[in-house]
Amino acid sequence: MAVSYIVLANNQVTNRYIEREYDMPVHAWSALYAIVTYPGLRAKDIQHLFPRPQNTISRVVALLERRGLVHQIVSDQDGRAKSLLPTSAGITLLNEIKEKALERQDEMFGVLNDEERRTFLNLCRKIAAGQRLCHSEAMRTS
């Protein structure tokens, strides 16, 4: 439960800050993160990175587009498929958000010395690279 507590507490602080400062819900800035990190992905691809309902992702993409943070390009092969690309304003905004998030992480991990921090982050990378992060046998639904 300690991991859940750390993640939930950090998300609460980070998400509230971003919602207040940028008037942007977590779904929007995480989608912007995905689009900047993987330019050209499709809205349905975001579901594989951040499991959310398709209608939520569609609304978020529309919000990001209205704000001039992303734009869509229709595929030559399939008129229904649209690639998402960040604008320079989207990249700039995400860099601001990432800078603040890293500042928050430094604040949160300030109780760890350098070796403890490296160990913790290496363990997190190992867990994130595994197949069990988003799938569970213990919490399977039928």
Image (cartoon, rainbow, N blue to C red):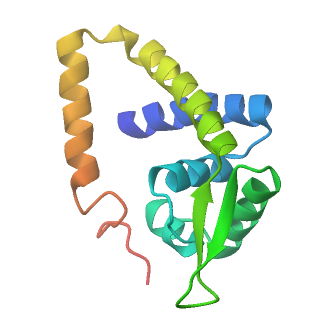
Q: Is residue 42 above or below residue 35?
A: below
> Left or right of 110: which side holds 36?
right
| Residue 33 appears in the picture as rendered | yes
Image quadrant in which you'd find residue 55? bottom right
Residue depicted at x 22% and y 57%: 130
Examine the rendered structure and indicate whether residue 52 appears above or below residue 32: below
Residue 96 percent location from the top left of the image? 61, 28
> Taking 6 as reference, is 26 left or right?
right
Foreground residue among 43 and 51:
43
32 and 5: which one is in front?
32
Which image quadrant is residue 100 in?
Answer: top right
Image quadrant holding the N terminus, namely top left
Q: Position of residue 10 (x, y in %)?
A: 52, 30
Q: Residue at x 60, y 50 (%)?
A: 32
Q: In front here: 95 or 87?
A: 87
Which residue is rendered at x = 50% and y = 67% of the image? 41
Q: State left or right for residue 135 relative to residue 71.
A: left
In this rendering, position of residue 88 left or right of residue 141: right
Residue 1 appears anywhere in the view = no
